[in-house]
Image (spheres, helix red, strand yellow):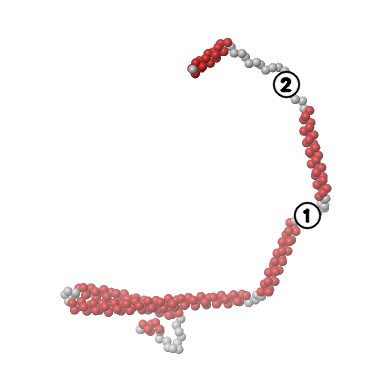
C-alpha cells in the first residue's frame, strides 16, 4: 500500500468521507512508518560514514561511493523530516477540529435540554409566583411579630398614677433616712480623761555630763 493510499484511502468521489477519528488514526500510522524509515536511514548514514573512513587511504573509490550514498540518505532523511512536520501539523489541526466539533455538539445538546426545561415556563407565571411567595413571607413575619409581642390581659393601669405612687414611696424612704441621720446628733460622746499623762523622767546627772562631754569633743574635732 502506497503512502498516498494510506493517507487518502481508496474511496472514489462518491464515497463517504472519513471521520476525523479515522483520519487522525491514519496520520498517526503514517508518522510511525516515517519514524521507522528515519531510524533506518540514520543507521545507513552511520554505516556509510564508517565505510568511507575505513577506505579513505586504502581505496579512495570505495570511500567516494560510500560518501555519495551517505549524501543520498541524508537527502531522504531531510525530506522525511519535512514530511513528518507537515503530517504532525495536519494531525494537530484535525484533533483541534474534532475537539471543537465535540464541544459544539455538547453545547447544542445542552441548549436543547435547557429549551425543553423552559418550555412549560411562563415568565408572567413566574412573576406571579414570586409575588405570592413575597406576600406569604411578609404575612408570616407579621404573624410571628404578633405572637411574640407580650400581652397583659386585665392589666389596664394608668401610667401616671403608677409614677405618682412610686414618687411617694421614694419620698418616704428619703424622709426615713434623714430622720435616722438626725437622731445620731444626740448620742453622748465619751468624757475627756481628767488625769494627766505621766511626765517624762528627768535624766540623771551622770548622763547629762556625758552628753556635754560628747558635744565638747565634737566641737574640738570640728576646729
Q: Helix or strand or loop: what does disc 1 sit on? A: loop
Decide: is 107 above or below 196.
Answer: below
Within 10 angstroms of label 2, few (less than 14), some, or many (20 or more) residues?
few
Residue 17 badge: none
**87, 174: nearer the viewer:** 174
* Left or right: residue 115 compared with residue 188: left
Residue 138: where, in percent of width, then height? 71, 64
Q: Earlier in the sequence, mark 2 or mark 1?
A: 1
Residue 25 appears in the picture as rendered: no
Q: Which residue is mark 1?
A: 151
| Whether residue 165 can be seen here | yes
Q: Position of residue 53 (x, y in %)?
A: 21, 73
> Where is residue 209, by image quadrant?
top right
Instruction: Please name whichever residue, 77 or 153, is drawn nearer the observer in this view of the structure.
Output: 77
| Image quadrant in which you'd find residue 113 | bottom right
**Is disc 1 surrounded by few (<14), some (14 to 19) or many (20+) residues within 10 Å?**
few
Query: Mark 2 = which residue?
Result: 192
Kind of element beneath mark 2? loop
Residue 174 vs residue 106: left or right?
Answer: right
- Quadrant assignment, res 187: top right
x and y percent of residue 212 in the render?
Answer: 54, 13
Task: Find residue 82 and report its horizontal and vertical position in percent.
Answer: 35, 78
Seen at 66% across and 74% down, the residue is 123
Q: Residue at x 19, y 79 (%)?
A: 61
Q: CA distance from mark 2 to mark 1?
A: 68 Å
Q: Residue at x 82, y 52 (%)?
A: 156
Amino acid at each position: 500500500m502506497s503512502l498516498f493510499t494510506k493517507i487518502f484511502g481508496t474511496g472514489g468521489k462518491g464515497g463517504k468521507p472519513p471521520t476525523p477519528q479515522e483520519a487522525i488514526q491514519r496520520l498517526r500510522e503514517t508518522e510511525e512508518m516515517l519514524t521507522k524509515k528515519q531510524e533506518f536511514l540514520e543507521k545507513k548514514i552511520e554505516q556509510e560514514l564508517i565505510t568511507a573512513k575505513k577506505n579513505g587511504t586504502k581505496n579512495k573509490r570505495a570511500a567516494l561511493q560510500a560518501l555519495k550514498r551517505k549524501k543520498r540518505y541524508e537527502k531522504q532523511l531531510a525530506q522525511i523530516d519535512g514530511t513528518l512536520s507537515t503530517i504532525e501539523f495536519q494531525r494537530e489541526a484535525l484533533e483541534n477540529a474534532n475537539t471543537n466539533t465535540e464541544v459544539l455538539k455538547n453545547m447544542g445538546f445542552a441548549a436543547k435540554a435547557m429549551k425543553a426545561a423552559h418550555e412549560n415556563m411562563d415568565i408572567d407565571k413566574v412573576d406571579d409566583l414570586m409575588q405570592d411567595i413575597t406576600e406569604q413571607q411578609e404575612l408570616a413575619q407579621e404573624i410571628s411579630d404578633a405572637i411574640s409581642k407580650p400581652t397583659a390581659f386585665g392589666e389596664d393601669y394608668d401610667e401616671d398614677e403608677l409614677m405618682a405612687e412610686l414618687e411617694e414611696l421614694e419620698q418616704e424612704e428619703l424622709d426615713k433616712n434623714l430622720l435616722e441621720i438626725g437622731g445620731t446628733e444626740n448620742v453622748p460622746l465619751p468624757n475627756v480623761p481628767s488625769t494627766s499623762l505621766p511626765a517624762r523622767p528627768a535624766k540623771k546627772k551622770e548622763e547629762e555630763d556625758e552628753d556635754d562631754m560628747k558635744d565638747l569633743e565634737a566641737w574640738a574635732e570640728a576646729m
